[in-house]
Amino acid sequence: MNSYVRKDAKRSKTMNTKYLLAASLVGGLISTVLVNTPYVNLINLLVCVGFWIGPIVAVWLYRRLGGTLTLGQAVVTGLLAGAWHGLFGLVLSPLGLAGVGSLLNEVRPFVPAQDWPDLETALTGVGGILFNLAGVAVDVAFGFIGGLIGGAVFGARRATA
């Protein structure tokens, strides 16, 4: 019986890659939609909830698919959901749907025409890349927070040695 307990404990420490990818992709997509959809993105006025609700949902989904969840697994799931959100933002930015591309579209009506070329030059090229990479870092940080919250809410337990 003792060997059975050890095998069960060992199995719960390893993550199921299929569940991790599915849950984190769903979480990343949820965050991307909440943060970048017009009017829906106003939800971010409530403590940036659009950024961390996706990782929380990812943790919930991982636990639902796998049955068990450790705090480490919750954090990894949240971090990966945040990374997916960042990647989706990088892809959507050149289309003007996220990141610096979206910012430029939003401020265009408020910037005088003579100042527009300077702003556009500053936020494209290296400036735009740095802005978007900073956004990815923010997405991953909120993924970490969402993973911790999800682990706490959905009863993650600490893995024992």
Image (cartoon, helix red, strand yellow):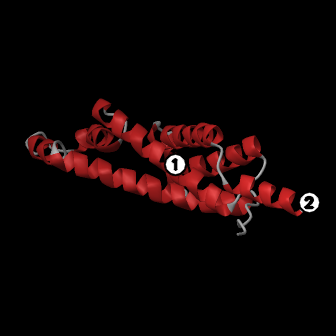
In front of the other: label 1 or label 2? Answer: 2
Q: Residues within 10 Å of mark 1 (few under 14, many from 20)?
A: many
Q: Is disc 1 placed on a helix, strand or loop?
A: helix
Q: CA distance from mark 1 to mark 2?
A: 36 Å
Dot 1 amino acid type: Leu
Say whether disc 1 or disc 2 marks the residue closer to the N-terminus: 2
- Give x and y (percent) for residue 26: 59, 38
Task: Give the quadrant of the N terminus.
Answer: bottom right
Q: Residue at x 61, y 43 (%)?
A: 20
Q: Is residue 103 left or right of residue 20?
A: left
Badge 2, how many Cα within 10 Å: few under 14, some, many 20+?
A: few
Q: Looking at the rendering, in which quadrant would you find the C terminus?
A: bottom right
In the displayed orientation, state which residue is furthest to the bottom: 161
The residue at 51%/37% (across/down) is 33
Q: 1 or 75, which is in the foreground?
A: 1
Res. 18 visible in picture: yes
Q: Position of residue 137 (x, y in %)?
A: 38, 56
- State the SS at label 2: loop
Q: Which mark is residue 42?
A: none
Q: Amino acid at mark 2?
A: Met
Q: Which residue is under mark 2?
A: 1
Residue beneath the point at 86% across and 56% down: 4
Task: Check disc 1 and report the residue beneath it.
Answer: 80
**What residue occupies the far top of the structure in this picture?**
95
Residue 126 horizontal/vertical position (percent): 16, 47
**Camera sees residue 47:** no
